[in-house]
Amino acid sequence: MKVLITGGYGFIGSTIAERFHKEGHDIYVIDDLSTGRKEHLTVPHKAYLMDVADPSCDEVFASVAFDVVIHLAAQVDVATSMREPVADTRTNVLGLVNILNCAAKHGVKKLIFASSAAVYGNAERIPVKEEDAGQTQSVYGLNKWLGELYCGRWGDYYGLKTLCFRFANVYGPKQGNGGEGGVVSIFLEAALRGEPIQVFGDGTQTRDFIYVGDIADAVLRGATSDASGVMNLSTGRETSINELIGIVREFHPIPEPEYRDPRPGDIGRSCLDNETAKKTLDWVPLFTVREGLEITYEWAASRSARQALAAERKPRRSWHKRVRKLRGYAENIILLGILVAYMTASPYSVPGTGAGSVSSLYFADGAFLWNPAVRARDRRSHCLLVRPEFGGRLVLGERHYGYSIPVSIFDLFVLRPGSRIR
């Protein structure tokens, strides 16, 4: 199949792309790199660097007959959605509608939409079932819910088959520090820096943390099946923030956490029933929270070590670069100083100039090599300073040679016996 993944350079998108590639499918990516990184995706693919709300996405769909579209591109931070609701709506609603329109217009067989547990808000029962959605607590949750409605209606209006997955809190290698699920990477990064973990609330709030590898497996099964509609992807188990900190502490020593006031839009409890996905897709999550965290910690620790090593090397590389850049100027200044100090009467003359206008100096082996104008060692060569006011030039046979010193008023030339200045 030809599979287009929007947001394919994100940590979820790149993991899904790798899973599909492993099964022999062709991978295409749309990503504006606002949060994704190219280095996340190492398998062969074709990329289109653009916003999902860009009308030119239609040209991408016109150029390739995609079988499946997996729409992951989104603004994923709840707090940001509350501060900037228009920006959240542009990406999470208008961006989706643009991709839906392109998919239906160009005959895509199936579109998978990444929704969120945020559509449930503070639900009355835990774990929540698919029919419990609608009590959203944030603009992010509201727009994800609207996205599901658009997907359903696009099937009714245009015959496009859609499948909406409500992701629980996804975590794993390559995860950034944004979004609700980003709490895992934020905690691990703080631990590796030896800083206290900051908790919004008292730490008793719960989330349903699911490893990204389990998500990728479910999406693959959804894309290759006849499944449609809406279903949860989760572990079906609550984990409190304090429990999460305790697991992180098993891998790395950390200071006591700092507790702060809850943020607007935050949810107290979150746990999703996953029975629909299990039955429909013949799927079960394979990783416990501890197993997934251990893999993620090992990746984060390895990245931290690489970054520390790069930070040590960077000043050294920068120092060498500055030296190389200044070397040409330094060499000319040294040459100029030597020539001025040891200037002697020149055996050569230039018509129309007074005494001292032209000077020459024999160089020893070591000093001669400092001359950047010389391309080969020649002990017979002379180095002359020619004042620019008489406009002379050096003639060596039929060829002209010259080298300008940007830090002086002189022109530096290499002169061989038998040469003349005119």
Image (tube, helix red, strand yellow):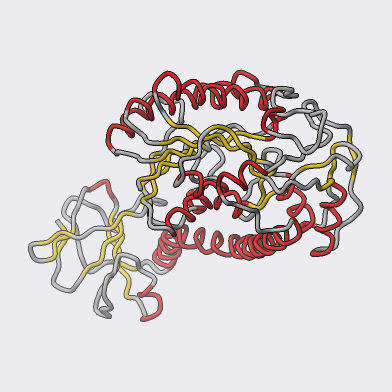
Q: Quadrant of residue 309?
A: bottom right
Q: Position of residue 200 (x, y in %)?
A: 85, 37
Query: Residue 82: image x %, image y %?
Result: 71, 23
Q: Residue at x 60, y 24 (%)?
A: 88
Query: How far from the left and from the top, in percent, is residue 327?
Result: 45, 62
Relative side of 190 to 23, left or right:
right
Please, which residue is most extreme toward the front here? Answer: 279
Please determine whether, in this image, residue 129 is positioned above or below residue 91: below
Seen in the picture, residue 329 relative to 32 is either above or below; the reply is below
Query: What residue is at 43 percent from the left and 38 percent from the top?
Result: 69
Nearer to the camera, 315 or 83: 83
Number of numbered discs:
0
Q: Residue at coordinates 28% horizontally, 78% vertically from top-left?
A: 377
Q: Residue furthest left?
A: 398
Q: Is residue 109 left or right of residue 166?
A: left
- Between 183 and 107, the residue placed more toward the observer is 107
Left or right for 226, reference 57: right
Q: Which of 341/244 is in front?
A: 244
> Horizontal and vertical percent for residue 242?
87, 49
Q: Quadrant of the C terminus?
A: bottom left
